[in-house]
Amino acid sequence: HVKHHGKNDIVLYHPSFQQQDFERQLAMSFQSALQNGEFYLCYQPKFNLRTNSIDSAEVLVRWDSPIHGAVSPAVFIPAAEKNGFIFDLTKWILEESCRQMHHWVQTDHPIKRIAVNISAPLFLSDRLPEMISKILKDFHLPASHLELEITETAIMEHFDEAFQIIALLKKKGIAISLDDFGTGVSSLTYVKKLPIDTLKIDKSFIDGVHTSFEDKALVEMIIQLAKLFKLSVVAEGVEKQEQLNVLKKLGCDSIQGYLISRPERPEALSLYKDRSKYG
Ligand code: C2E
Ligand code: CA
Ligand code: CA
Ligand code: CA
């Protein structure tokens, strides 16, 4: 019976089935992974082109699983968003990174601010402001040391709720970045209406900023837009000096990417080597 259907019979091995199954397997390991200390945090510096120095860093979570190996956050974060684990995970990420930031404050470290990625389900649940207030208090950390990166998709379908939450966080003194900027559909509307601080230009535009006239024009437009609304602007995924040269000419405020540093564990961060060539 099977042989009459030929190759169409392997429908069970369709990637989406495999992926769903893999995500389910990951999800089953989440809680024990958190308890066993399999998650850890890396920090990727942001280089400020106005002051020629590293002044902040994005927090990026990593998972070394004894069962699944090193799993990319691009894979396990969506799974954690689907099964609700993202709440516990982000609480842990906020605690760990605020502990680290508190230590950096005490040692007068160059990194003065950490930026934590916040997934849509947590952001929109309205549990975030309270969670953050408690953690800042527990770690004796002023709110000015914390920034949140949220994506456009998080606010797209629930604009009014998102607006309220952003306004509340702003009132507490927490800075807000709009991540992956330019990839959503109605970016312009949000910039006008939301009380945010920073636009992060998506890497997909930065990739061609030094080679493509169109990409350069788009990036220039975003930078001008940011200026108009008195927002700062960060370019993500900067890998080449040529990209940096263009971004400097266009008046970009800060850059982030492998050119400056990969995401590193705190003890591996090197912030003191010669940065004069970027200035
Ligand atoms: P994202 O927030 O857009 O983070 C930027 C991603 O680009 C990171 O990948 C970073 O390692 C990578 N990157 C930075 N500079 C360069 C560069 O110059 N070249 C290239 N090729 N890549 C660069 P990563 O760490 O694998 O994270 C992927 C995504 O997973 C993040 O995208 C974010 O959406 C999510 N994610 C990572 N950590 C967290 C977290 O702690 N919480 C949440 N909610 N999401 C996270
Ligand atoms: Ca981010
Ligand atoms: Ca991003
Ligand atoms: Ca991106």
Image: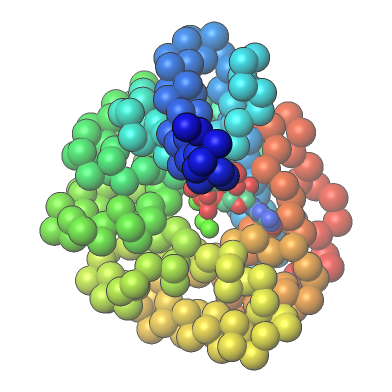
Q: Is residue 56 above or below residue 48?
A: above
Q: How is the image coloured?
A: rainbow
Left or right: 112, with 21 as reference point:
right
Please name the residue shown 28% across and 41% down the image: 121
Query: Quick one: 102 or 218, which is closer to the camera?
Result: 218
Please name the residue shown 74% across and 63% down the image: 239
Q: Position of residue 173 (x, y in %)?
A: 32, 48
Q: Quadrant of residue 182?
A: bottom left
Left or right: 2, with 228 as reference point:
right
Q: Position of residue 175 (x, y in %)?
A: 38, 53
Please name the residue shown 25% across and 61% down the image: 156
Q: Is residue 205 above or below residue 142?
A: below
> Which quadrant does the C terminus fall into?
bottom right
Left or right: 111, with 118 as reference point:
right
Q: Is residue 233 above or below residue 154?
A: below
Is residue 140 visible to the viewer in this orientation of the structure?
A: no
Is residue 82 visible to the viewer in this orientation of the structure?
A: yes
Q: Position of residue 103 (x, y in %)?
A: 57, 27
Please name the residue shown 66% across and 70% down the image: 207
